[in-house]
Image (spheres, coloured by chain):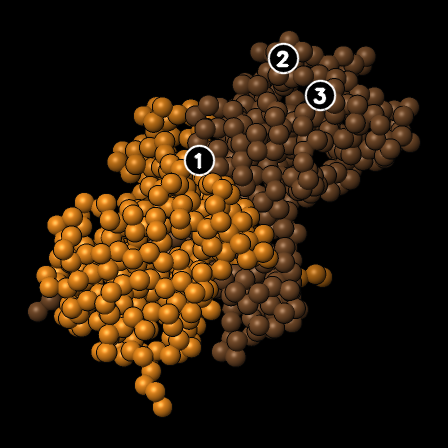
Chain colours: A orange, B brown
Amino acid sequence: MPVKRKPDQSIIEALNKAQRIAFGPVLFQAVRSALATGLLSHISEAQDTEDEAARACGLTAYAVGVLVDVLIAGDVLTKAADGKLALTKTGQCLLLDEMTRVNFNFTADVCYRGMDHLTEALTEGKPAGLKELGDWETIYPAISQLPHPARESWFAFDHYYSDRYFVMLAEELRDRLNPQTLFDVGGNTGKFAAACLKAMPQTRVTLIDLPQQCATACSNSILAPFADRFSAAEVDWLKPDCFPSVGHKADVIWMSQFLDCFSPEEAVSILQRCKPLLSERGRFAVLECLVDGQKFPAAGFSLAAVSLYFTTMANGNSRFYRRNDLLSVFKNAGLDVEYCRDNVGVSHTLYILKPTAAK
Amino acid sequence: MPVKRKPDQSIIEALNKAQRIAFGPVLFQAVRSALATGLLSHISEAQDTEDEAARACGLTAYAVGVLVDVLIAGDVLTKAADGKLALTKTGQCLLLDEMTRVNFNFTADVCYRGMDHLTEALTEGKPAGLKELGDWETIYPAISQLPHPARESWFAFDHYYSDRYFVMLAEELRDRLNPQTLFDVGGNTGKFAAACLKAMPQTRVTLIDLPQQCATACSNSILAPFADRFSAAEVDWLKPDCFPSVGHKADVIWMSQFLDCFSPEEAVSILQRCKPLLSERGRFAVLECLVDGQKFPAAGFSLAAVSLYFTTMANGNSRFYRRNDLLSVFKNAGLDVEYCRDNVGVSHTLYILKPTAAK
């Protein structure tokens, strides 16, 4: 007599997880619509039934029904026996948690359509998805011209992961290194430069970036009060012989989420070209998100996913570094790690580096 | 003294799940690239390191690295201490399980880009994503003209969820109802008609569908041996006064995944127009996937997700039914359920219906 076996729970769970991936874009867009139409926030406040929520949000019962079905199956909503809807904790994160919102909008507005070209980007080494946003070779010269809402979501992402920690980091640089001169390499709009100029009233700060970024920074009103101590120098690091022209040396060369915009070979070349710009006791201060340096799995997953933004949308050849790969870059550039601290800001690691002593 | 509290595990888990959703499209595309480049199948066979896998698949170490990072974080791959990569059970499902592959390709090739228009589809009640595939009002007249690879993935999906059970279902209809005449409403290319003609050597079968489907079916070679017992009748059910013209009545009117292509109001109207076509002891036999009739959560999630295909790509107003909604359609059309069986085929429910007796 054949024995009827129970299905293997681990296979059922694996099939479950696999369908979550296979329909991941659908669940994503369902959440996006539930956010955009106000359905999620209404349910969060009112815990209505489907019909009540449909009326309140100006949606058809059909529209709410198809969204609710997939959001319940996707663990974003629950429905009680009396038909009242509520958000799960996951749903609350999607509605209310800033990191989640920033990540979500970055995927939706910057990456979603371009990510459809990932295979091409991987095989050609070019940001093959960027054409969905505009006609550029890389995203960097184009950031200020990105179409709405990609531009807003890009800057919100940048702000969340980077510039909201600038005051704290500027104070840390002051307390730890007390530089008289600081070069902010890849300084973008000048926000970190302004934080440094404020935290260190004697320090001269030079922003070093592409011509367009330098122009933007120089007209940035937050830098106006510091005009006597601020300057900018243009450089295009992707031209192998290009150096910035600055009349003095740097006690600190600061690079915040800058090296992740380049391939390891390019990063080594940039660090090597920067070394002669250091003063006698000068140091590099490098801030990076390490994909394998995260305390929480959500952060590691997020960084690994955002690496594919670099692949598909940004430049086709950079990524958030793994720790050992970044240490190899430092070593190949002739730099020793003097200090390292994880969990700086939201998910960053701070390195202070000095040139390797000649043997 | 402040007590340092451990982070709430349920919040950490919720943040995790929320990032899985927020970067769901990225993980999806990473899996797609790992399938398309042969990386997943190579790892499944060879359990290589990243460098070995890159060489074997003709990819750069960078390309394999960014994919591997997100696939490990997404629970598709594992990496051992010696660097050897392997597939998780979820990864095995994505590579090898037919249902998962069919679902995955359906999302990738039919739905991904169109799903970016979900909010518009929900608020306008139109398949706003269909324009990503071509210029049509609904997908139904266009299925045979869909561009590659959408067409192949659409038919593979249809085959997996529907026509591979046709022989079994034709035999069940024979054994249960033994019809002399059968109308296959929404019979599409004629595959089920052929199965019935083969299983029931005395039965006359009439396929009823849009003109284009009728033409396709009539030229379908699998029906050629049954020319004396097969006919087709054109109808466009969306025109409220449209009836098919057939010279005889039906002992069975068969509708397989047909009513889910229409709104409940349209479905009631179609059933009401079909009722006069039944012979004295005639029955409807209706096969549907019920979103809340599934034994396994993966199936319920999949159906809920595919409902949004109807919303965004197909017609803007249909869906896989919930059981009570389908029962309401039957009731409003004046039909009683004579028999019902769940778990038919992969995830279907079979209803046999008879006209409600006049009171």
Q: Secondary structure at mark 2?
A: loop
Q: Residues within 10 Å of mark 1 (few under 14, many from 20)?
A: many
A308 up-or-down from B358: above or below? below
Same chain letter for marks 3 and 1: no
- Examine the rendering and report whether any part of residue A27 can be seen: no
Q: Secondary structure at mark 3?
A: loop
Q: Is residue A352 left or right of residue B324?
A: left
Identity of the residue furthest to the bottom in this view = A359
Mark 3 and mark 1: Cα distance apart in space: 30 Å
The amino acid pointed to by label 1 is Leu
Answer with the quarter of the image where residue A96 lies: top left
Q: Residue B283, position in %: x, y?
A: 70, 23
The amino acid pointed to by label 3 is Leu
Q: Residue at x 44, y 60 (%)?
A: A238
Q: Quickly name the residue at label 3.
A: B210
Q: Secondary structure at mark 1?
A: helix
B346 up-or-down from A61: above or below? below
Between residue B36 and residue A271, name the one nearer to us. A271
Q: Quickly name the residue at label 2.
A: B239
Mark 3 and mark 2: Cα distance apart in space: 11 Å
- Examine the rendering and report whether any part of residue A135 can be seen: yes
The amino acid pointed to by label 2 is Lys
Q: Is residue B281 left or right of residue B237?
A: right
Q: Residue B210, position in %: x, y?
A: 71, 21
Chain letter for mark 2, please: B
Q: Residue A215, position in %: x, y?
A: 29, 48
**What is the quadrant of the N terminus of chain B in the image?**
bottom left
Identity of the residue furthest to the top in this view = B241
Mark 2 and mark 1: Cα distance apart in space: 28 Å
Q: Mark 2 or mark 3, which is nearer the start of the sequence?
A: 3
Chain letter for mark 3, please: B
Q: Quickly name the residue at label 1.
A: A67
